[in-house]
Amino acid sequence: MTEIHTIRTLLIANRGEIACRIARTARSLGIRTVAVYSEADAAALHVAAADTAYPIGPAPAADSYLRIDHLIEAAKATGADAIHPGYGFLSENPELARACAEADILFIGPDVSAIEAMGSKAAAKDIMAKAGVPLVPGYHGTDQSAQTLENAAVEIGFPVLLKASAGGGGKGMRVVERAEDLADGIAGAKREAAAAFGDDRLLIEKYLTRPRHVEVQVFADRHGNAVHLFERDCSVQRRHQKVVEEAPAPGLDESVRSAMAKAAIDAAKAIDYVGAGTVEFIMDEDGSFYFMEMNTRLQVEHPVTEAITGEDLVAWQIRVAEGGTLPLTQDRISASGHALEVRIYAEDPEREFLPQTGRLSRLTFPEKMDGVRVDSGVAEGDTVSVHYDPMIAKLITHGRDRAEALRRMSRALGNVRIAGLANNVPYLKRVVEHPAFIAGGVDTRFIETYRADLAADETREAGNMPLLAAAALLEARRLDVLRQARLGGDPYSPWAMAYGWRLNDSPLHGLTLQHDAEDLLLLYRLEDGVYVFEQEEKQIRIAVSLHAGGRLEARLDGITVQAEASIEGDVVTVFYDGTAHRYVLKTALASGAEAGEDSGHVAAPMPGKLIAVHVTEGTEVSKGDPLMVLEAMKMEHVIRSPDDGVIAAMHYGAGDQVEEGADLLVFETRAAD
Ligand code: ADP
């Protein structure tokens, strides 16, 4: 008979969204929760999500979230009788499961033996081969001599994939296309594997050229029951890491679906599995599928399974860990509709998905939309640091069918507001709106295949957005100046009158906005409260009003536009029609000297104080040289030379307060040779 334990206090050995998500279920089950946190996370959301929180060390994960001794100490100190490891960190580390057993703490996961059996990709394959689970043609033997590996690769046939046996997270994989490259490839892969995992053993697989990643959620208890909760398609990946997941897998043949589910249950049974597990398969174009690996934990993408089955997988995990039976038998588990998940990352899709760090100056989600779930572990104002995974949130949508789930996803993404750092929201929106994705044509090469379509396209999305962003920024600064003047108590101060004077003859200003590494120089004047932008032969008139909560209403050449704006220092993000447009004010480049003119006036782009002046009458300057530094709104703006030329006259000096539009100096363009 299996003993029944009743968990009273659960320690969550993780952080971020998954710690918050586990706490939610534990609380709903009446279980007290304990969060652990590093020094960097003292004010993190997951700390507030738990009843008790316990510090476990400095920011680097190796000194905190990966310290088994600290976790056990935290559990003892807080009276926790169970530990949930979440995913990542120590979730697949048999030592944590072992330490829990020794300390008489329930580990929410499978037995040590199952974790160990699946910990090595090569050993796992041995077990699966014996259980009759199909494997990718390949070599996973113990003889690791270069000659044996080379012979094996030749026998498998090119292209082959070299994988670190101890690998994970998409790291340490290498495709070798030709026999000539094999020796180098093997040496390189061994080096990488040794460096990343401290183990240079490799396995070799046939490299499938257009495969899909399809995985099956399995669950087993200590009473001999094992079930599956359908499959998930996680083919859309970058760097062999998932970004979009869905359930069920689109267009999967029913016979393949049931064969895959059976193979997954066989795999779980082969290792006497207990708890939640995922059996990952790689599927060829003809529907043949092969075992890749089994993850002995909850997966990041488990919410799509929850959405279609209506079950809470964390509640299932807790019940099984307590020694209970699975809540449902196979015939009572059903799937309804379709679900999608996207992973929102602080990363820059335009720069090879480079992770970004920084402060989330704006962060809101469309939590209240029908069929939308948001799992997030950060709040507005939090910092995405270098220490942990840069995932900001997961957005999950569910619909009666795939089309409905997709439409909801597209709209939900359009209502995510993130400002402060680059992120993949606009990119994800392009993925889920791509015709090939809509048609269900997913494979692991999706992102590569449609690279050009998925790239941000200035002409497609920008339109008047830079102008709107500039107008919003200028207007926000103007309002700040007015507010300060009012606070200063002098309604007649020139600060309070910075605008609205020059009905005619208002000077032309320039400002440079940076967008996706490109500089946009905008020339504008302020006429009667309206920003008039000069674009080639055209003038575009924008009147903006900024409202509470960032709402931005603009009249753009007579058409009213409703948008939102987030302004943080020199960064302005305009959210319009479901897309975020982010610009950085580079320099306030004042310019009165347009091409063709031989002299002009350089005007102050905003009211402020000149804190440095680099030129005097007669100074020869080149285009872009710094002329003056203006301090405004606690920031420094370098005023640069609009062209090559000479300073003809100076009207202000260092220390002077200047009004917006003040004529700072006269500039003469050097005559062309
Ligand atoms: P990791 O444990 O590092 O995540 P996996 O073995 O799970 O590595 O593989 C990760 C991804 O790499 C898969 O989802 C798939 O996109 C790709 N992949 C793995 N094996 C193959 C293969 N034999 N042929 C083609 N692509 C593969």
Image (spheres, rainbow, N blue to C red):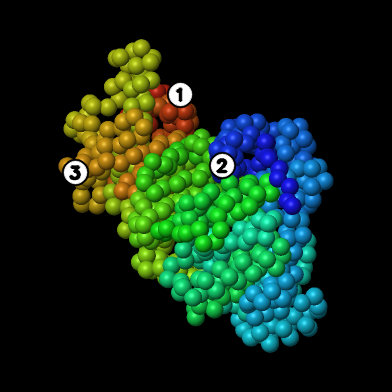
Assess disc 2: are there few (<14), some (14-19) or many (≥20) residues with their C-alpha within 10 Å of its C-alpha.
Answer: some
Establish if 137 lies above or below 473.
below
Tell me the amino acid under the disc marked 3. Ile
Name the residue nearer the viewer: 337 or 346. 337
Residue visible at 17% across and 42% down in the picture: 558
Mark 3 vs mark 1, CA separation in Å? 43 Å
**Quadrant location of residue 125?**
bottom right
Looking at the image, tell me whether mark 2 or mark 1 is earlier in sequence order: 2
Tell me the amino acid under the disc marked 1. Gly
Ligand 1 within 8 Å, label 1 CB: no
Q: Nearer the viewer, mark 2 or mark 1?
A: 2
Residue 252 visible in this rendered orientation of the protein = yes
Residue furthest to the top in view is 489
Establish if 293 lies above or below 207.
above
| Label annotation for residue 559 | 3
Tell me the amino acid under the disc marked 2. Thr
Assess disc 1: are there few (<14), some (14-19) or many (≥20) residues with their C-alpha within 10 Å of its C-alpha.
Answer: some
Looking at the image, tell me whether mark 3 or mark 2 is earlier in sequence order: 2
Name the residue nearer the viewer: 216 or 540. 216
